[in-house]
Image: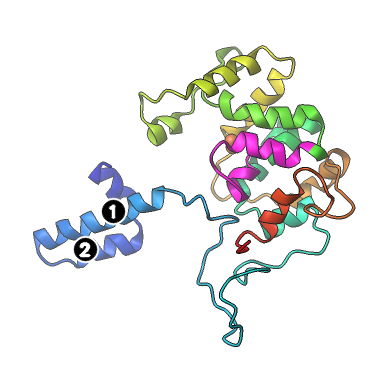
Amino acid sequence: MDRRDFLTGAGAAAAAGIAAATTLSAKADALEDAMMTELDRRVIEPATFCDVGGELTFDPADRRPFLQGNDPRLPPMPEKPTLIDFFKLRFGPSNHVLQSAAYARKNGMEEKVVLACLLHDIAVESFIRSDHGYWGAQLVEPYVDEEVSWAIRYHQALRFFPDPAVGYEYPEAYYRFFGRDYQPEPYIVEAAEYARNHKWYMTARLITLNDLYSFEPGVVVNVDEFTDIIGRHFRQPEAGLGFDGSPVAHMWRTMIWPNNFL
Ligand SMILES: [Fe+2]
Ligand SMILES: [Fe+2]
């Protein structure tokens, strides 16, 4: 990590620690410490679901050694949770997908593309980061048009490949994230090639196009703005997500109770 880059982005606590050090060598040590902490933070713990933060405090009278049931750090979910309940109580922060969907709608995209944008990164936000397109597609597969889940699956690979014909450039941020010489794994190259020649290519490509401009700080979009589109294009199971006996119900239950011992 470049020291100057690090200092520009250093948090207030790290900066104060470095400033408070009185000698040059103490300052260097404080900088080193702060950089180590920052590097640790960059490795996202795979076991952290639903952005659980804060101290885990239990009722002292509860002598059970393991957590099984509601995690006190998370708001409890309704008995029959809807997609919107997940947006409000589990996905978070979901500003990125909400902004993408709002941008797609502003661009006059058809509703299923807006829905695809709304759901395209829910795996990153609440479930599993790695291979998020595949996990995200699987989560919604029983409830959306096949084209929507297909597009969510393949947007992950297509993000790495420019398509100048439609104005899609390689994301500048990826140079910073992964380095200038980063080459996607062969399975990603193959998936992108397959998607490129598929009849639904443009639906997945549109996710990537509306994705690029969707990190706008200060813009807050509420999921309620998409109630109609969700109602028309997401087959909400009556028993609630997690309890409908679908092949992915367990994945939604895991987001309800992400830290169950078993
Ligand atoms: Fe994504
Ligand atoms: Fe995204």
* Quarter the N terminus occupies: top left
Badge 1 vs badge 2, beta-carbon distance below 8 Å: no
Picture residue at 23% right of the left edge, 45% below the top = 3
Q: Which residue is mark 2?
A: 19
Front in this rendered view, residue 108 or 261: 261
Relative to residue 102, is residue 145 depicted above or below? Answer: above
Q: Earlier in the sequence, mark 1 or mark 2?
A: 2
Front in this rendered view, residue 67 or 233: 67
Picture residue at 75% right of the left edge, 40% below the top = 140
Q: Amino acid at mark 1?
A: Met
Picture residue at 77% right of the left edge, 50% below the top = 83
Q: Amino acid at mark 2?
A: Ala
When asked about the image quadrant of residue 62, the answer is bottom right
Local SS, label 1 = helix
Q: Quadrant of ligand 2?
A: top right
Front in this rendered view, residue 88 or 101: 88
* Quarter the C terminus occupies: bottom right
Residue 101 seen in the figure: no
User: Mark 1: few, some, or many residues within 10 Å (few <14, many ≥20)?
Assistant: few
Residue 189, given in percent of the width and then of the height, sits at: 53, 19
Q: Residue 36, which numbered label?
A: 1
Q: Is residue 124 one of those drawn in magenta?
A: yes
The span picked out in magenta is 120-141
User: Mark 2: few, some, or many residues within 10 Å (few <14, many ≥20)?
Assistant: some
Residue 244, given in percent of the width and then of the height, sits at: 84, 51
Relative to residue 137, is residue 16 depicted above or below? Answer: below
